[in-house]
Amino acid sequence: MSSIRRWLLAGLLVLVPLAITLAVLNWIVGTLDQTLLILPLAWHPDKLLGFHIPGFGVLLTLVIILLMGAIASNFFGKKLGGWGNSLLRRIPIVRSIYSSVKQVSDTLFSENGNAFRKALLVQWPREGVWTIGFLTGVPGGDVVNHLPGDYLSVYVPTTPNPTGGYFVMLKKSDCIELKMSVDQALTYVISMGVVVPARPAGSPLNPPL
């Protein structure tokens, strides 16, 4: 029975990650294939080829993104984009949503953007409990008038889905900079601590920032 149990666990360790990966990829491809609906029915690959091949929506989405990027990068596109941004910022309710999303997307996707600057070790949600956070900047606006001393803006992700989390402002002296890349730290968080980054040689403890 012990051998059967061991084989069962070994099989699950192989099949479960593969099945989840294929399911996620299938969902992504299926969602992107919906972009084909913007084409005239006669242009649909299913109609032209006579059978369905999944993934054409991915190519169409990529073409649309590249086309929009090419347009936005030239002089006319920048002028048109500026006019569109100005218009959206004048519409009540829409402007608050659009402005927030635009700032986040500019930070995440611009060439000069640096959303997660460094991986940090912080005490959260209470003293004595440690987790990984990401340095996003320093407090600004009226906030700095109420925070004496040096503080950092930190994003603390949840696991295994790091897109959800908490934005907190912590004392700089309470944050420990980790000697690992942001990618390594994200992998560590997503894997719930299973995938452990290699320990830096000759540094048993990392000093505070």
Image (cartoon, grey):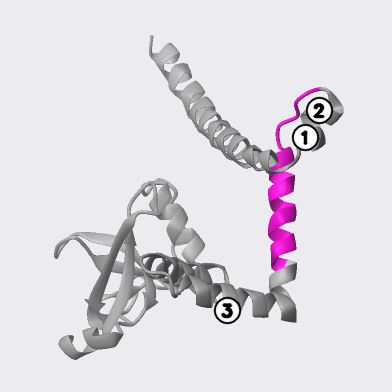
Q: Is residue 186 shown to the viewer in this render?
A: yes
- Check if residue 64 falls in the magenta segment: yes
Q: Mark 2 points at which residue?
A: 47
- The residues tagged by marks 3 and 1 sit, at their Cα atoms, a distance apart of 38 Å
At a point 70% along the width and 40% down the height, the residue shown is: 36
Q: Name the residue under label 3.
A: 112
Amino acid, disc 2 = Lys
- The residues tagged by marks 2 and 1 sit, at their Cα atoms, a distance apart of 5 Å
Q: Nearer the viewer, residue 141 or 91?
A: 91
Dot 1 falls on a residue whose secondary structure is loop
Please name which of the two marks, 3 or 2, marks the residue nearer to the observer.
Answer: 2
Judge whether 14 appears above or below 37 on screen. above
Where the C terminus falls, by quadrant? bottom left
> Which percent across, then down, holds residue 64?
71, 55
Amino acid, disc 3 = Asn
- Point out the stretch of residues depicted in magenta: 51-69
Dot 2 falls on a residue whose secondary structure is helix
Q: Mark 1 points at which residue?
A: 44
Answer yes or no: do the residues labelled 3 and 1 have beta carbons within 8 Å? no
> Which percent across, then down, holds residue 145?
19, 90
At a point 71% along the width and 37% down the height, the residue shown is: 55
At a point 14% along the width and 65% down the height, the residue shown is: 127
> Which percent across, then down, holds residue 135?
38, 73
